[in-house]
Image (spheres, helix red, strand yellow):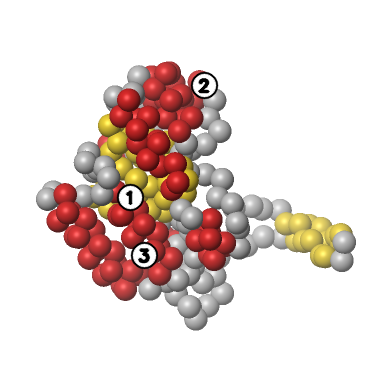
Amino acid sequence: KTAKFRNNEILFCGNNLTKFEIIDIGNSGVEIIAESIEQILKFKKATNIKEIGLRVALAESFYKEINEVEIQRQGIPLNILDEALEIARKNSITITGLHTYIGTNVKQFLPFIKAISCLIEQAKKIDTLQYIDISGGFGISYIDDTFPFDWKSFGKIISQKMKFLSNYFKRDIELKLEPGRSLIANAAVLLTTVTEVKRYNGKVFIGVDTSL
């Protein structure tokens, strides 16, 4: 808000929130994405929220393939998404969107296409859907451009899929994209000074006087 963004331009998704953070965020007027059933109920109890988006955790095999991580700790697992939708309905909360995060520095665009395809299938259950939101570490080549992220192909395919979803609902469904550091990470050089070199369990650790 300090940067003059309007409430409807701010999308919040977070975990491990305190009661005071939930109250503050819930009353701020920004769009909110809940990452668990428990969080849905906490926002409802604390702020009587009327609309919310849901963060979805895809199949564990999906994350293992991308990041060699077997367990995704954030988001509502697919096998209880229907339960989350029912809890929202019983509490008079309108589900406005679905969101997922797939990992860090993913240099191939196909995992993002797979993720959004999964979201689209789940989105068909939600008559009140307004948007699909996909985020993650869109890959960057820090050293060279041998394998740059293929934004052109990604954009073409994802546009087709969003057109399909809009046609399914017979209204425009918005795509929210969170490019993160891919916008600027390879646009500069970080200069720093090595302050310490230490060895631990056969590995070398280098300390510097700056951070990102």
Q: Quadrant of the N terminus?
A: top left
Name which of mark 3 and mark 1 comes first in the sequence: 3
Q: Which residue sits at x=56%, y=45%?
A: 73
Q: CA distance from mark 1 to mark 2?
A: 30 Å
Under tag 1, what secondary structure?
helix
Q: Which residue sits at x=49%, y=81%?
A: 146
Coordinates of residue 186 in the picture (x, y in percent): 49, 66
Residue hosting label 2: 19
How crowded pointer 3 is (Cα within 10 Å; few <14, some 14-19, many 20+) is rated as some
Q: Which residue sits at x=32%, y=25%?
A: 90
Coordinates of residue 28 in the picture (x, y in percent): 36, 26
Q: Which residue lies most toward the bottom here?
A: 146
Name which of mark 1 and mark 2 comes first in the sequence: 2
Under tag 2, what secondary structure?
helix
Residue type for callout 2:
Lys
Residue hosting label 3: 113
